[in-house]
Image (spheres, grey):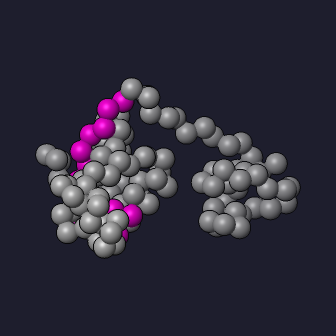
Amino acid sequence: MPWCQKCKTEYRGGVTRCSDCGSELVEVLQQIEEYPKNDSESFLMSVRDRIEADIVEGFLNSNGIPVLRKYKGAGAFVDLYLGISYTGVDLYVPRSMLEHAKEILSGHYLVSADE
């Protein structure tokens, strides 16, 4: 049975494209290597607000990279209450995935090598 590598959905025979994301189906679903559970987080970048954090997190999550958000000061409370944070959001990824995350974002965001 064919599978969508991106959505992890199994399809009936004869189907060649995923109806959700449009990806070409494969016969064997490859396992994505998970990061070690004891891997600490590393700072990736700061973004202005939740909307920008959602965009960056979407790029990374679609490539199997989890993201941890840390708001500055009372930013999380203000974001929850008002729907926007004026203090910015720091984004962290597992240390073992930091370089890969920077590569993914290099075409979309400026991520300096010294961060």
**Residue 105 visible, this angle:** yes
Answer with left or right where residue 49 lies relative to residue 37. left
Q: Nearer the viewer, residue 93 or 23?
A: 93
Q: Nearer the viewer, residue 27 or 5?
A: 5
Name the spot of residue 63 as percent of width and height, x first.
47, 51
* Percent of width and height locating residue 107: 31, 62
How many marks do you count on the picture? 0
The residue sitting at 32% across, 52% down in the picture is 69
Asked whether 74 falls inside the magenta stretch, the response is no
Q: Residue furthest top?
A: 38
Residue 111: give x, y in percent of width and height.
Answer: 22, 55
The residue sitting at 26% across, 40% down in the picture is 42
Query: In x, y percent, where is residue 96?
Result: 35, 34
- Which residue is drawn at the image coordinates 71% and 42% (left, top)? 28
107, above or below 103, in the image: below
Camera-side residue of 90 and 3:
90
Residue lying at 19% horizontally and 55% vertically, measured from the top left: 72
Q: Is residue 89 left or right of residue 2?
A: left
Q: Does 40 appear above or below 105?
A: above
On whether residue 45 falls in the magenta region, the answer is yes
Q: Residue furthest left?
A: 114
* Image quadrant where residue 16 sits: bottom right
Which residues make up the magenta segment?
39-54
Whether residue 109 is visible:
no
Instruction: Give residue 21's quadrant in the image.
Output: bottom right
